[in-house]
Image (tube, rainbow, N blue to C red):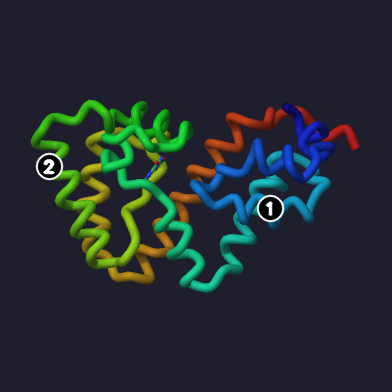
């Protein structure tokens, strides 16, 4: 789909297609629809990032809380969204050794207990070892630093999801 087709979508189709570019936060997609037409993919991504940046800290923490744990309950029970399932599988989260899985679960719980939101990383730009190393390191950060870091990762996940939906090299036909 090129950016011209994106701009021509009805509100319903726009949210149906792009509603999960930020995990389980269709409100963001619903909000940025008003900013069409988008000159290119980057403009759509920028509109989403600006909406996120304008949120109060509580809103940013809410976005982080909408993310499933890596290798967590949702993965085990098969209740991940399609996007998360694919991302987590590609990062090897569904193929951890018992020891790795136990370490992941322990560190995820420790992280969530400290910050009140889950550890979020763009799995598509990472791998099993990096994820474990980042989780181990980032859990020691201060809250403001980690909240900002998590939102950076949310934006990366959004970019990857957008790129799989919109042809970024097709110029707008406006
Ligand atoms: N807690 C997470 O980081 N979750 C995820 N990162 C991804 O890239 N996909 C997810 O589901």
Residue 93 x/y as whole percent: 27, 33
As helix, strand or loop, the secondary structure at mark 1 comes to: helix
Q: Name the residue under label 2.
A: 102
Tell which circle, 1 or 2, labels the residue nearer the N-terminal end: 1
Residue at the left extreme, as displayed: 99
Relative to 31, is 82 on the left or the right? left
21 or 76, which lies in front? 76
Q: In which quarter of the image is ligand 1?
A: top left
In percent of the image, x 27 and y 39: which residue is there?
71
Question: Looking at the rendering, which quadrant does residue 148 occupy?
Answer: bottom left
Q: Disc 1 marks which residue?
A: 30
114 shown above or below 164: below
Image coordinates of residue 3 in percent, x first then y, are 77, 35
For the point 57% across and 64% down, the residue is: 53
CB atoms of marks 1 and 2 within 8 Å: no
Quadrant (top left, top right, bottom left, bottom right) of the C terminus:
top right
């Amino acid at each position: 789909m090129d950016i011209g087709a994106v701009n021509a979508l009805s509100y319903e189709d726009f949210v149906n297609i792009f509603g999960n570019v930020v995990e389980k936060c269709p409100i963001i997609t619903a909000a940025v629809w008003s900013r069409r037409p988008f000159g290119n993919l980057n403009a759509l991504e920028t509109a989403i990032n600006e909406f996120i940046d304008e949120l109060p800290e509580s809103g940013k923490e809410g976005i982080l809380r909408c993310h499933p744990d890596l290798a967590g309950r949702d993965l085990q029970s098969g209740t991940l969204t399609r996007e998360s399932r694919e991302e987590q599988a590609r990062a090897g989260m569904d193929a951890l050794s018992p020891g790795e899985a136990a370490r992941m679960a322990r560190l995820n719980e420790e992280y969530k207990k400290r910050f009140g939101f889950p550890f979020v990383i763009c799995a598509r730009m990472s791998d099993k070892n990096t994820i474990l190393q980042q989780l181990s390191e980032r859990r020691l950060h201060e809250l403001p630093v980690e909240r900002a870091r998590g939102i950076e990762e949310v934006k990366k996940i959004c970019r990857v999801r957008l790129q799989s939906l919109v042809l970024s090299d097709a110029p707008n036909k406006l």
